[in-house]
Amino acid sequence: MPSAACSECADSVVSAIPVASARWPAVVSLAMGVFGLVTAEFLPASLLTAMAADLSVSEGVAGQSVTATALIGAIAAPSVPLLTRRIDRRLVMLSLTVLLVLSNALAATADSLWTLLAARVLLGVALGGFWSMAGALAMRLVPEDLFARAMALILTGVSVATVCAAPIGAWMGELWGWRSAFIAAGAVSMATLVVQAVTLPALPPRAQPDLRVFGQLLSRPAVRMALLAVLLVISGHFAGFTYIRPLMENITQLSVGAISAVLLGYGVGGFFGNLVGGYIAGRSERLAIVFGGTLIAALAASLLLAGQLAIVATVAIVLWGFAFGAFPVGFQIWIVRAAPDQAESAGGLLVAAFQTAIAAGAIFGGLLVDRIGALGGPLFAVVTMALGALLTLRHGPRPLPT
C-alpha cells in the first residue's frame, strides 16, 4: 500500500535531529526501493497474455501471480516488524531488497506457473515488509520537520512506477519477450541494493511490538468500517486492472503498440489523480473515496456496455487511473482518524487490508474472466466499487464540528 504508515509504533517517536544531519541519499535509496517493488508488482498486468501463453495456463490462472504477491504481502506487513524486532533496520531493509532481486531473477527464468508463483511470494514478503517500516525509517533519517518532505520523495517512486511499469513492460514484452521486463526490473533492484548498502546508516531497533495492539484496533467499529471499505474498493480496482490487457486485446482488439499507449495514459492519469485525490482528501477523505469509487464504477460500466469501441475503452482506462489516485491518501487519513492514538499500527493493518483486497480482486476477477471472458473484471469492479462508495458515503468519517 503506497503511503501506508509503519506498524512499529515506537519508531515514530523521533528525537530532535539537526537539519545538517538529514540523510537525503538514504531517503532516495528508499524511493528507489519503492520504485522497484511497485514496478515488479505491476508488471503482470501488462504481460499477462504472453505469460499465460508461454506457461501454458489460462489468463485467469496466470493472474494468480498477483494473488500470491498480495496474500503474502498482507501477512508480511504486520509480521516482518514482529519477527525482526531485534535486528538492525538497515540489515532488514537490505534483506528485503535482496528478496526483490531474487524474485525478479526467478520470474525471468520461470519455466512453470509454480516457479513464477514462488517468485511472486518472495516479492510479497519484500513488499509487505518494506511498506510496514518505510515511514518509521524515514522519520529516523531526517529531522521531524522534514518528515513530510521525505515521505513525498519516497512516494515519488510509486508515481514513477505507475507511469512507467505497465507501458514499458508491454513494450519490452513485445520486442524481446515478457521475461525481458523482469530482467530489466532485476537490474533496477540490483542498483537499488548497491545504493542502499552505501547510504543507509545503522538503525538499531527501537520498538518491541506485539500482537495485542492489532487486536485492540480491530475491536474498534470505526477501524473495522475503514478496512471493510478498503476490501470492497481495492478488490474492485484490481479485478479490473489485473485483467485489463485481455480486455484490450480480446474485446477492444487493440494492437500491442496501442495497448502500451493506453497503459501509459493510465499511468499518467494516476499521477495527476494522486494530486487531485490528495487535494480532495485534504478537505474530506470521505468525499475523495466516494468520488473515486463512483467514477470507477461508472467507467467499468462503460467498458461492459461499449468496451469494444477503442475510444470508449481508451478514455475509460485513462480516467480509471486518474480516479484511483483518490484512494491511498483518503484511506490513510480515514484510518488515522479512526485510531489517532495508534496511527502507525493502524497503518500496518491498512497495508494488510490493501494486499488482501488485491488478492481478492485477482482471484474473483480471474474466476469471472475464465467463465465469462475479459469483461468479468469490469463486472466485478462495478459491483464492489458501488458497494464501497455507498458504504463510505454512509459510514465514512464526517468533518469534525468547528
Image: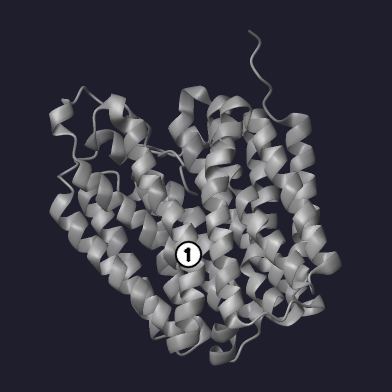
Q: How many labels does the image show?
A: 1
Image location (x, y in percent) of residue 159: 45, 52
Furthest residue toward top: 402
Q: Residue at x 40, y 38 (%)?
A: 210
The reply, left or right, for residue 211 in relation to residue 224 is left
Q: Which residue is drawn at 25% across and 35% down?
A: 140
Q: Can residue 88 be seen in this view?
A: no
Q: Taking 315 as reference, is 143 above or below it? A: above
Q: Quadrant of residue 330?
A: top right
**Colouring chosen for the image of the structure:** one colour
Q: Residue at x 67, y 26 (%)?
A: 397
Q: Taking 346 as reference, is 248 above or below it? A: below
Image location (x, y in percent) of residue 171: 48, 78
Q: Is residue 170 visible?
A: yes
Quadrant where the C terminus is found in the figure: top right
Q: Residue at x 51, y 35 (%)?
A: 346
The reply, left or right, for residue 236 in relation to residue 157 is right
Identify which residue, 297 or 9, lies in the foreground: 297
Q: Taking 149 as reference, is 235 above or below it? A: below
Q: Which amino acid does label 1 sit on?
A: Glu
Q: Dot 1: within a 10 Å radius of its alpha carbon, few (fewer than 14), some, or many (20 or more) residues? A: many
Image location (x, y in percent) of residue 376: 77, 70
Q: Quadrant of residue 193?
A: bottom left
Identify which residue, 393 or 133, lies in the foreground: 393
The reply, left or right, for residue 199 in relation to residue 117 is left
Furthest residue toward right: 305
Identify which residue, 376 or 6, lies in the foreground: 376
Q: Is mark 1 on a helix, strand or loop?
A: helix
Residue on which disc 1 sits: 41
Q: Taking 243 as reference, is 233 above or below it? A: above
Image location (x, y in percent) of residue 354: 57, 50
